[in-house]
Amino acid sequence: MKSTSFLIIFLAAILNVNAQQEPTEYSIEQFYENTRVSGGSFSPDESKILISSDESGIFNLYEIDISDGSKTAVTNSENESLFAVDYVPGSGDILYSADKGGNEINHLYLLKPDGTSKDLTPGENEKAEFGGWNNTDSTLYYLSNKRDAQFFDVYTMEIGSWEPKMLYKNEKGYMVSDISASGIYLVLSNEITTSENQLFLLNTETEELTEISKPGFYYSGTGFNKDETELYYTTNHGGEFSRLMAYDIDTKKSDVIYETNWDVMYSSLSENDTYRVIAINEDGTNKLLLWENASQTPLELPEIEDGNIVAANFSDSEKLLRLTVGTSKTPNNIYVYNIQTKEIKKLTSTLNPEIDPDDLVSAEVVRYKSFDGLEIPAIYYKPLNATADNKKPALVWVHGGPGGQSRVGYFALLQYLVNHGYAVLAVNNRGSSGYGASFYKMDDKNHGEKDLQDVIYGKKWLASQDYINEDQIGIIGGSYGGYMTMAAMTFEPDEFEVGVNIFGVTNWLRTLKSIPPYWESFRKALYDELGDPTTKDSIRLKEISPLFHAENVKNPIMVLQGANDPRVLQVESDEIVEAVKANDVPVEYMVFPDEGHGFIKKENEIKGYRQILAFLDKYLKDEDVTMPDNVLKD
């Protein structure tokens, strides 16, 4: 009897392992039956939260009833994505933000209960950003570049009249990072380089400008206490990683509130300063601390398996905390946590119920050595059924930036590719954020060189795994990662079998000269890191621009481009595509007439990502694949 039971258990274990090793493959349409959500403002009576969701195909506004989780559509836009900002205090109105076709010229809109809306910032080229409400909930603060396209001034609008009034005229090109609730104080940043800035506190009544920063470090404001006697900020002054500081406005002295061996990203206080949350970037994941503020006593937060808390927001009563939580196998979901009762409610279910999360892959943090011995962190997705007897093709994914970071979290494209048999290594090459100030600076004026070698050594790491087909490794990336993809295909043409460039730079001279005017406060810092195209730096910028070396490309490439992209102009992709075609190299080109720098519309993502998989199956797996219909450019 015992031996029979053992045999049954043994066979069941084998069957279970086999079942785990043969995941169901899902279509791109099934992956995009998933939903993306963002926001989560509490209604005045704290019975609902206001979110943005793309369940309609593009982002619209929805309200969720906290008690029963029921969701109601507030808007039904079919052309432009709308993003929730907040409920307007003392009214039934809602504030939201939208641009046109991905052009990044965001306006602020007032939505009335009857469904009508009003553009509060109607200037044709006016880009506006929400800055908060004042301490009596009677006035809106916002940033706008309507006076000068290069600089953002601070304006107020009284609720009801909605007439703009300038609070601060920004004549020095500072970035405005914080506005106190009284409007008395502004936190201003002068970007010197991408790793150094100056941080100032401006008293708008006395016009006194006080510098808080020390030379050589980076600072970021993260709010005031309720009495506005303290400003909070983060800085890497004093170490490799950013720590949370408190600045006493009267004594002009700073003290450390919290530090650890990772970057503190931000902190926020509840309405009456009873509670504080502190967000930490810990090895590519978000860690959130909740404190009783006066005593700095840690409070319990709910455990969510594989959870990555990406955002948090207190209700005005200080009883509730909205949490936005994702995992590497599920898109972000909205939760509400009752701090007093410790009850947590999940208010959204964003994963398509047709998809079994056990068929998807948990991201793993790995590290490998680059050409010079530098340790490179990466986020790794290994197909469930990859074995030495079942070798898989692989991709190196390169994040955007420069200075971005691949993080543990859900990314539909990567899960789609892994689900269809591709291992993916998302590298955090030198120059990535999150691993200390020294690591972040390592790619300055060295782009497309040492950081490219980090990417190539990621390929070598993949090739060393016994379940990877070393002859089937490609490269893929978006924005700066798209540049790195084309740099690899151009300057190291024998390394990768294919390259997929998503909205990527190929001509640094044009890109850096055509920076949108509203980036003016950041332009000099960007030039310091990458090079100034109007100086002798232009020689090196041309040397590292794939467009001018396209004759080197010998393996198939795919390029995706938004026609309304203000950062990487369509002409840039047009030119690299034509140049590579002249080599008699297979090129797949997709231009999306209603997108900017990245995808907003599900329909376009489905078309683009389906095409990417077909391209990879044909040219990396060497399968007999008929390419889907293309998206034709105008």
Image: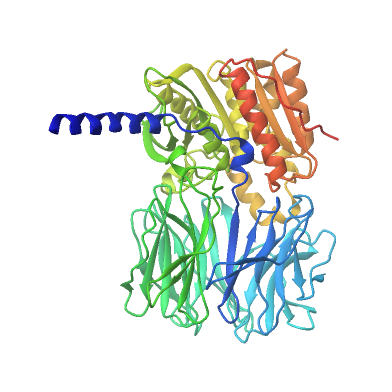
Question: Relative to residue 327, is residue 228 depicted above or below?
Answer: below
Height in image: 95 above or below 6?
below
Find residue 457 and report its horizontal and vertical position in percent. Answer: 44, 26
Residue at the front extreme?
1
Taking the spot 72% from the left edge, 26% from the top edge, the residue there is 628
Where 385 falls versus 414 (above or below)?
above
Q: Residue at x 82, y 33 (%)?
A: 633
Which is nearer the eye, 438 or 251?
Answer: 438
- In the rendered image, is residue 386 in sight? yes
The residue at the far left in this view is: 2
The N terminus, quarter of image? top left
Quadrant for the C terminus, please. top right
Q: How many marks?
A: 0
Which residue is farthest top?
Answer: 584
Q: Is residue 171 visible?
A: no
Q: Residue at x 62, y 87 (%)?
A: 136
Indicate left or right for 401 with 266 as reference. Answer: right
Give me the residue at 54% from left, 32% from top.
Answer: 417
In percent of width and height, residue 80 lies at 77, 55
Please tell me which residue lies in front, 140 or 633. Answer: 633
Q: Is residue 176 left or right of residue 356?
A: right
Query: As displayed, is residue 559 above or below residue 150?
Result: above
- Residue 278 quadrant: bottom left
Residue 560, given in percent of the width and then of the height, sits at: 70, 34
The image quarter in which residue 465 lies:
top left
The one of 454 and 186 positioned closer to us in this rendering:
454
User: On the rendered structure, is 567 left or right of 485?
Assistant: right
Percent from the top left, x then y, of residue 507?
70, 32
